[in-house]
Image (cartoon, grey):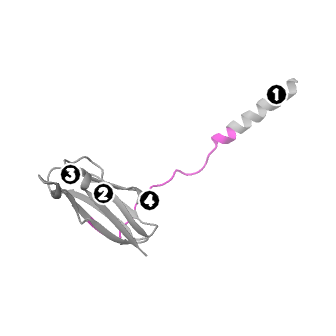
Amino acid sequence: MMKHIFSILLLSLILIISGCGNTALPEKKVILEADREITIVGHTGPELEDFYFEPAEIIVKKGEIVKLTLESSNAVEHGIQVPALKITLTDKSPEIFSADKVGEFEGRCSILCGAGHAVMSFKVIVEE
């Protein structure tokens, strides 16, 4: 009985030690150089129709590396999220992305920016 307990403890110790010997290199963040840069401007104002992004849609090629930058036409902060393409863009943080699928992908303003916030939409069209 004591021999079995010792064998189990020894085997457990070996498994624990072998798990600590992970020699894989840490994942490096790859910095991509963009094929194209696009600046999007968020607009706001006193009327509902004053809330929009310019341009309201962009067309990119599948696999093209695109740097998106967001600016504001005034001091109001904006953000854009396009969940299907995993794009999260703010006026403080540009986004570099490359679409891996063709289609039309809807995005919205992700930072509450005023009464017209809900109408601020954005579209990414990805072509072959």
- Return the residue at label 2: 94
From the top left corner, tell me how far across and down residue 110 is, in percent.
30, 50
User: Helix, strand, or loop for circle 1?
Assistant: helix
Image mark for residue 30: 4
Q: Nearer the viewer, mark 2 or mark 3?
A: 3
Image mark for residue 34: none
**Magenta stretch, residue numbers:** 17-38
- Check the picture and name the quadrant holding the N terminus: top right
- Return the residue at label 1: 6
Q: Seen from this angle, which residue lies furthest bottom? A: 128
Amino acid under label 3?
Answer: Gly
* Residue 31 lies in the magenta-colored region: yes
Which corner quadrant of the image does residue 96 belong to? Answer: bottom left
User: Helix, strand, or loop for circle 2?
Assistant: loop
Residue located 82% across and 26% down the image? 5
- Within 10 Å of the Cα at label 4, are there few (<14), some (14-19), or many (20+) other Cα atoms? few
Q: Nearer the viewer, residue 39 or 80?
A: 80
Q: Earlier in the sequence, mark 1 or mark 3?
A: 1
Q: Is residue 91 visible?
A: no
Q: Earlier in the sequence, mark 3 or mark 4?
A: 4
State the separation of the CA atoms marked 2 and 4.
15 Å
Q: Earlier in the sequence, mark 2 or mark 4?
A: 4
- Return the residue at label 3: 116
Q: Nearer the viewer, mark 1 or mark 3?
A: 3
Q: Nearer the viewer, residue 82 or 68?
A: 82
State the separation of the CA atoms marked 1 and 2.
58 Å
State the separation of the CA atoms marked 1 and 3.
70 Å
